[in-house]
Amino acid sequence: MGTKTELKNQACRRYREAIERLADQPAARISASLARHVETCAECRELLNGITAVQYTLDQVKWQSMPAGTLALCNRQAMKKLQQRVRESEKGQELAVAKPDLPYWQQATIRIGRGGIGVAAGLAVVMFNWAISGGLNLTNDELQRLGQVHQKHHIGNWNDLNGNLS
Amino acid sequence: MDYVNTLSGLIDLGQADIACPDQRCLLSVMERHGPGLVQMLWRVLGHQADVADAYQETFCRLAVLLHDGKSWHKKGFVYRMAANIAIDMLRRRKHCAGGEEHLDLAAGRETDPAAAADQKDERERLEEAIGDLPDHLRHVLVMREFGELDYEAIASAMRISAGTARQYRHRAVLMLAQRLNGSAKMTDKGR
């Protein structure tokens, strides 16, 4: 009841306005008369304390430093999520299975190209086999010929029991 | 440094021919407003994983808006959307019993455990009080105090005048002061 009477007091209302202005200017100084008033008026004191506490806590939150790398983590995660959403979207699914709408001549060129690549690959295998097996046969023949020459010149006919070379 | 490397990579990607205009636009918003947004989300949520979640959700919603051809290129709009998401997350967190430990105001600075606990209490009470503010006051307060946006940007995002934005912030602080006083009284009576 007493508080209500006090609020009706013109001076109290004036101080209250001054206190409320502190919400916009936290750095503003409290006048001596206001300081004296809040000592006697509980209502105004509570308001002043409340505003000061709010400003103080808001400042504390502002000065709280972020853990290092938070920004990089956020950017990476956001990019991943965006890419995932794009892939999962209807359009993304369509694109994943879509075939390009090419004119007939381009499709034909691609088919001919694919066929050509297949034929070229087959030919390459055949050529490789032919070259390798041909080379091996040649080497084998040559080695046999060299063996015969060697036998003829250095070993001779072992049928001669006296050990004379023919 | 880690951030610079990551983002420069993304921006390179954005400027490449393979990126469509929508992607380039998103990346440019990420480059321009990313640091400020993360800072604001950190101040509201105080938990790294929550900040990352809110940040990615913000960009996903922006991407949807961009896809729908809606204009959102103003800074205030992006901040408002992020603030909305963060506040929703705060509310959800409040409803989840035994939620994770978040922003410890005194971490690394306050050596007195009692003072640290008091500060934490104050922060929690403030968080709760902010959550109980009417939407328009809460948005202005969060964008102004945590996002450090000027009144013009806030006004543009909220489609109000700068003077009204200033008044909303004033009213929000007064309401918080009353709320905190009330809850302080309750706590004192409880003790």
Image (cartoon, coloured by chain):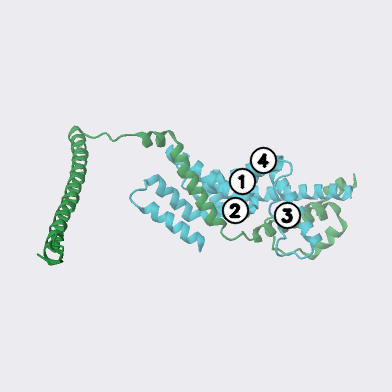
Q: Position of residue B18 (x, y in %)?
A: 34, 48
Q: Amino acid at mark 4?
A: Arg
Task: Give the CA distance from mark 3 to mark 2.
Answer: 18 Å
Q: Amino acid at mark 1?
A: Ala
Task: Give the CA distance from mark 2 to mark 4.
Answer: 18 Å
Residue B161 showing in the rendered view: no
Residue sitting nearer the eye, B128 or B76: B128
Residue sitting nearer the eye, B86 or B10: B10
Residue sitting nearer the eye, A50 or A96: A96
Q: Colour of chain B?
A: cyan
Q: Give the SS element for disc 2.
A: helix
Q: Position of residue B189 (x, y in %)?
A: 89, 48
Position of A19 with respect to B57 (left or right) is right
CB under 8 Å between callouts 1 and 2? yes
Which label sits on residue B92?
A: 4
Which label sits on residue A37?
A: none
